[in-house]
């Protein structure tokens, strides 16, 4: 009995322990590589397929949706694998070690479409994109789960998410600002393959660094003695977890919006504003609110909480598309609207992963079942569905408008579709995103939930 009490005291102290800033820094560095690949694929793959590889927009749109739906299904499987993994390194960290090199290789192959005829190219892009999805899932789900396993202390988890946000921002800016100019400077297919090779090398290095420099704390000895939760039981608990449902639907909406802002932006600067080079500036200004927020967010989170800040900036973001409508062909007006619209991205970068992991504690408190991997993978499914839906909308609406990649002037209907993808649809999605964040009120309950869980385990 005395041994059991000592064991529980040790477990609770491990759960309350917060990683130091050096460990948080290394975790964030690992996220830099993951987001580098995500941003490269999400922002430029559609353009690469249509304007460089010469694949029709309609085919690309269908590929994006089919592949992302498949991606979401693999997320659920990967989450279950993470929950069932037992090793001396934990249950999330080993996957980061194992899957880093395969992800780097597949990133390069994705942007190396050979000139083997239309049918051959379609087969190649389907095979390589689906393979990339498999290995990307093998890295990204463990990364997201690891955030919840490194600490259970709410403020520490929020700060850790802020670290990931900093590196998400840096990674996104590196790709958004430099990828298109570097690829253009090198020229043609080789230019994009070179950019992909750089990204692939980075993900390999950062994965090894994150594996060797982080530690899993939450769960401890208690979880190691428990049997695996049956998938059916875990899924049932998941879909009765109201806050997980809200945050997952939020992921669908937010990542559809993000996919449109990133993937359709290059078409807008090319055919509406008249200069593809403007896209780097648009990408920079889109993340300006988040860059400024990094200097204040930790204190604001401590005072107001994640949800309240996320709700406030989401409301601000709604006004971005409205400003753009003042004069859609004006660069200065478009840039002002972009900055305002960027507020809506703040929750995705700064708070989302912490909020997802908070729902794991709610599920354990409500139903007595803890499945961090399944919670993260199922929410990630929402992200992938959103990203796929956004990519599909770009391809399908461009095809509907008669868009032809590589020509100087597009049809008036194609231009209308580009406007819809960048202004009208994002406005509607921003409103939905705000409503969902208003419905998410877990922050108020979380301190009591954590206290109850610690009492149960002691």
Image (tube, rainbow, N blue to C red):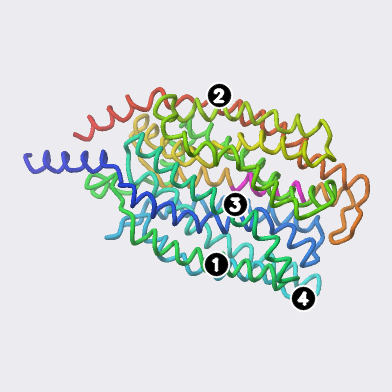
Q: Earlier in the sequence, mark 3 or mark 1?
A: 3
N-term-proximal mark, 2 vs 1 = 1
Residue 24 spot, x, y in % from top left: 37, 49
Q: Is residue 359 above or below residue 264?
A: above
- Nearest to the observer: residue 121 or residue 22: 22
Q: Are marks 2 and 1 in contact (CB under 8 Å)?
A: no
Mark 2, Cα crowd under 10 Å, few <14 / some 14-19 / many 20+, is some
Q: How far apart are marks 4 and 1 (CA)?
A: 22 Å
Identify the residue under disc 4.
Answer: 115
Q: Can residue 389 be seen in this view?
A: no
- Quarter placement of the C terminus: top left
Label 1 crowd (10 A; few <14 / some 14-19 / many >=20): many
| Whole-number angstrom distance, CA of label 4 to CA of label 2 | 49 Å
Screen quadrant of the N terminus: top left
Q: Name the residue under label 1.
A: 200
Residue beneath the point at 31% across and 56% down: 90
Cα separation, mark 2 vs mark 1, equals 38 Å
Q: Earlier in the sequence, mark 4 or mark 1?
A: 4
* Label 4: how many Cα within 10 Å (few below 14, some 14–19, many 20+): few
Query: Which residues are the magenta region?
Result: 384-395
Q: Residue at label 2?
A: 438
Provide the residue designation for mark 3.
173
Q: How far apart are marks 4 and 3 (CA)?
A: 31 Å
Q: Which of marks 2 and 1 is in front?
A: 1
Residue 3 has which mark? none
- Residue 216 in the image: state x and y as whole percent: 31, 51
Element under label 2? helix
């Amino acid at each position: 009995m005395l041994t059991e009490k000592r064991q529980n005291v040790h477990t609770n102290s491990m759960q309350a322990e917060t990683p130091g800033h050096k460990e948080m820094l290394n975790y964030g560095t690992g996220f830099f590589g993951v987001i580098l690949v995500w941003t490269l694929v999400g922002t430029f793959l559609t353009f690469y397929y249509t304007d460089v590889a010469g694949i029709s927009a309609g085919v690309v749109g269908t590929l994006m949706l089919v592949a992302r739906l498949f991606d979401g299904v693999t997320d659920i499987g990967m989450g279950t694998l993470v929950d069932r993994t037992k090793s001396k390194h934990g249950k999330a960290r080993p996957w980061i070690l194992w899957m880093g090199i395969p992800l780097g290789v597949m990133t390069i192959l994705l942007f190396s479409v050979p000139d083997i005829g239309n049918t051959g190219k379609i087969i190649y892009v389907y095979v390589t994109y689906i393979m990339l999805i498999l290995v990307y899932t093998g890295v990204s789900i463990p990364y997201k789960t690891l955030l919840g396993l490194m600490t259970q202390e709410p403020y520490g988890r929020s700060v850790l998410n802020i670290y990931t946000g900093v590196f998400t921002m840096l990674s996104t800016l590196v790709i958004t600002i430099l990828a298109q100019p570097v690829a253009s400077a090198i020229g043609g297919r080789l230019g994009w393959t070179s950019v992909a090779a750089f990204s692939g090398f980075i993900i390999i290095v950062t994965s090894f660094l994150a594996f060797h420099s982080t530690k899993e704390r939450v769960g401890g000895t208690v979880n190691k003695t428990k049997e695996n939760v049956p998938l059916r039981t875990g899924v049932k608990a998941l879909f009765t977890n109201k806050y997980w449902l809200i945050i997952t639907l939020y992921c669908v909406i937010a990542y559809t919006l993000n996919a449109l802002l990133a993937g359709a932006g290059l078409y807008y600067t090319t055919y509406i504003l008249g200069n593809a080079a403007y896209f780097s500036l648009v990408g920079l200004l889109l993340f300006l609110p988040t860059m400024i927020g990094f200097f204040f967010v930790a204190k604001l989170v401590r005072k107001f909480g994640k949800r309240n800040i996320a709700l406030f900036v989401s409301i601000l973001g709604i006004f971005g598309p409205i400003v753009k409508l003042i004069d859609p062909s004006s660069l200065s007006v478009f840039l002002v609207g972009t900055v305002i619209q960027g507020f809506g991205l703040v929750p995705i970068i700064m708070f989302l992963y912490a909020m997802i992991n908070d729902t794991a504690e709610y599920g354990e408190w409500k139903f007595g079942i803890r499945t961090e991997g399944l919670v993260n993978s199922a929410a990630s499914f929402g992200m992938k569905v959103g990203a796929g839906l956004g990519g599909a909308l770009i391809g399908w609406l461009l095809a509907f408008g008669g868009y032809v990649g590589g020509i100087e002037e597009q049809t008036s209907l194609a231009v209308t579709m580009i406007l819809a993808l960048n202004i009208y649809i994002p406005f509607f999605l921003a409103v939905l995103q705000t409503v969902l964040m208003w419905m998410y009120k877990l922050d108020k309950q979380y301190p009591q939930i954590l206290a109850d869980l610690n009492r149960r385990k002691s």
